[in-house]
Amino acid sequence: MKKSFPIRDVPFLRQRQPSLADIQGLIDLQAQAAFLVDFQHQRVLLANARATELTAFTRNELAQKSLKDLLPALSSENLPPELARGPLSLFANLATRHGTSLEVFVNLSRLDPQGNWGWISVEPATVHYQQQADIERLKQREADLLALALTFQESDTNLAVQTTLEVAQRLPVRPCIAFSCFPPGAQGWGGR
């Protein structure tokens, strides 16, 4: 039987409209740099601490930035029409205090049906590329381990040994692989 988990009394859940301080607290929980934006006026309303680290702007400076100045790819004239249909991910350049820009991976969502409010989270493109490479390595490792497991079902011993050695070369930790070649029905080690 499942027990319900009681939700503690959270003051802003009782309000109809959360305050900006409540929203700021939620944004600060985001691991990536995040911005609450007003698309209608093309302004940043709130930013989290990670956004200040990434751009070197203060929260107040970020709140005074136009979207065009901070993320030119998301200005009203450049805003992709796909955003009207749902969340959008893209690569863009993020302005920094030093006058340079940083290539970032952007996740963008509209928060209301009219499209006035938006949530933007960004991470450096290098971090995104590394995460994608890690995912690909894990997929390859999973495929290699599956191939290794399937060699035990292989009736052709030479093919099983060749496949095992090929797979073992790609694994990050070289396993110690022992082969036992007994004719079918024969007893194993030491005649047991």
Image: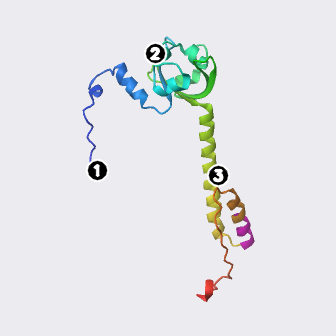
Query: Which comes sooner in the sequence, label 2 or label 1?
Result: 1
The residue carrying mark 3 is: 140
Mark 2 → mark 1, Cα distance in angstroms: 46 Å
- Crowding at dot 2, Cα within 10 Å, few <14 / some 14-19 / many 20+, comes out as few
Query: Which residue is disc 1 drawn over?
Result: 2
In front: label 2 or label 1: 2
Q: Is residue 87 above or below residue 168?
A: above
**Which one is in front, 183 or 105?**
105
Instruction: Tell me which numbered mark, 2 or 3, is placed earlier along the sequence.
Output: 2
Q: Is residue 146 left or right of residue 62?
A: right
Give me the disc on residue 60.
2
| Magenta stretch, overall SS | helix
Give the magenta-colored segment's residue range: 156-163
**Residue at the (50%, 23%) spot, across then down:** 52
Is residue 162 shown in magenta? Answer: yes
Q: Which residue occupies 48% across, 33% down?
A: 31
Residue 108 appears in view = no
Describe the element under mark 2 as helix, strand or loop: helix
